[in-house]
Image (spheres, helix red, strand yellow):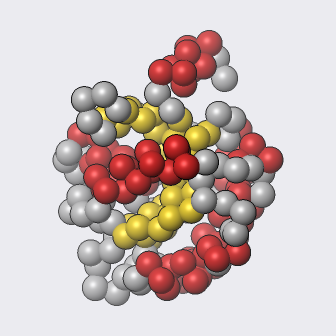
Amino acid sequence: MGAITSKQNKQTPRVLLMGLDSAGKSTLLYRQQRGVVMETSPTVGFNVATVQLDKKTSLTVWDVGGQGTMRPNWKYYLEECKVLVFVVDSSDRARMAEAQKALKKILSDEHLKGVPLMVLANKNDLQNSMNIREVSTLLELDRYTNRVWEIQACSALKGLGLQQAFLSIYKLMHKA
C-alpha cells in the first residue's frame, strides 16, 4: 500500500468488508457511515469509508467487490487487516455454499492468521431470511476453532443491528 494509506492505517484500524456480490456490503457501509440508504451499484474494485462509532472511535472500512471475477483479487487487500467482516445475504439459500467456499478460501490466507471474523447475516428483515444459527451452520463457522468469530443478523436497508455490529467489530479487534 502507498504512504497515504499506511499513515491512515495507524490512525484508524482497517476493517475489510467482503462477501459475495449482492450481499449488501456497500449499502451496509454507507447506511452505517451516513445514516441513510444510498443507491449503490456493483462495486468494481473497492470503496473506503471511515465509520465513526463515537466521538473518539472510528474504523476505516474497505468494502471490496464480491463478483466472481473480483474474488481472486481479495488477497491484495488483506495486509494490515484487523477484522474481516464477511457479509452474506441471509435470504439467499441458493448461494450459501458459494459463500462458504469463498469464506473458507479467504480465511486460509496467511495474512488473516489470527484476524477475528465477524459474519453479518444481512437482509434479516426479509420474510424468507435464515436465522443466524442456519447461516452459521451453512458457513461451517464451528470449524474455525482457532479464530475469534461472531455472527450477527442485520438489515442494511432498515438499519437494524448495524450499530451493534460495528461496536462488536471494534470489540473483536481488541480480543485478538
Task: Write down the quadrant of residue 147 in the picture.
Answer: bottom right
Residue 10 in percent (x, y) is at 54, 21
- In the rendered image, the vertical position of residue 5 relative to residue 106, given as above or below: above
Residue 54 in percent (x, y) is at 26, 36
Count all numbered tags in the image, as a single digit.
0
Residue 163 in percent (x, y) is at 28, 52
153 or 147: nearer the viewer: 147
Most extreme residue toward the top is 3
Q: Is residue 6 visible?
A: yes
Residue 132 in percent (x, y) is at 44, 78
Work out which quarter of the rendered image holds the N terminus and state it: top right
101 or 73: nearer the viewer: 101
Most extreme residue toward the front is 175
- In the rendered image, the vertical position of residue 55 relative to residue 134, given as above or below: above
**Is residue 32 toward the left or the right of residue 43 in the image?**
left
31 or 94: nearer the viewer: 31
Residue at 48% in and 83% down = 133
Residue at 48% in and 21% down = 11
Residue at 56% in and 62% down = 149
Task: Write down the quadrant of residue 56 in the picture.
Answer: top left
